[in-house]
Amino acid sequence: MTARGSAIVLIGFMGTGKSSVGKALARQTGLPCLDTDEMVSTRFGLSVTEIFTRLGEEEFRNAETEAVRQLAGTGSAIIVTGGGIVLRPDNVRMLRSLGRLVSLEADVETLFSRIFRRATRPLLRTANPHATVVELLRLRDPLYRAAADLRVDTSTLTHDEVANAILSGIEKL
């Protein structure tokens, strides 16, 4: 069995609250919060949406994998990942070495209401964004479930309540 680090790694679909919960966890624990999307944005000097538009999804995914590599040896931290990080098995393997993977989940209607508050989701620039969400969830949900050490439904919880559930759940692992 591979040794596991002490980080808390948040995975899950867009709109599950990874970024906000990551900040809540950082506040509660005093640990640094590192965000792979922010790392990729900083690398290119572009927003995630601009990276997808100008360079394409494959270039973004390559940079995302490199960001995960850069996190090796991070130690105790909160790590927030993008929704597609689980699409590459190598990413999941590297994230597992960093610590416990926590999948944040929410029911479809909650996801719709959260996702469509912001028009900055590059994968949803389609003719039928709702159908795209359903299809992406169908493809990714098994990957989140397989990777997760702990799963937390965020549908009806505040960010602090989710953070508390994560900290409590990790103690029991």
Image (cartoon, grey):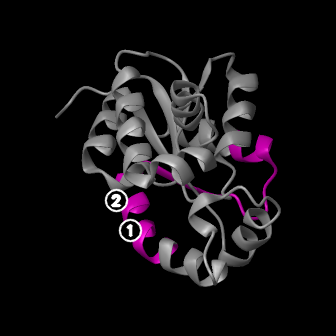
Tell me what residue is drawn at x 51 percent, y 25 percent. Answer: 43
Residue 160 part of the magenta-drawn span: yes
Q: Quadrant of the N terminus?
A: top left
36 with respect to 14 (left or right): left
Q: Residues within 10 Å of mark 2 (few under 14, many from 20)?
A: few
Numbered label tally = 2
Asked if residue 110 shows in the view, the reply is: yes
Q: Position of residue 39 (x, y in %)?
A: 54, 28
Q: Nearer the viewer, residue 33 or 38?
A: 38
Assign a secondary structure to mark 2: helix
Q: Which mark is residue 155?
A: none
Q: Which residue is mark 2?
A: 146
Residue occupying image coordinates x 74% and y 25%: 28
Q: Which residues are magenta?
A: 137-164
Mark 2 → mark 1, Cα distance in angstroms: 6 Å
Amino acid carrying label 1: it is: Pro
The quadrant where residue 51 appears: top right
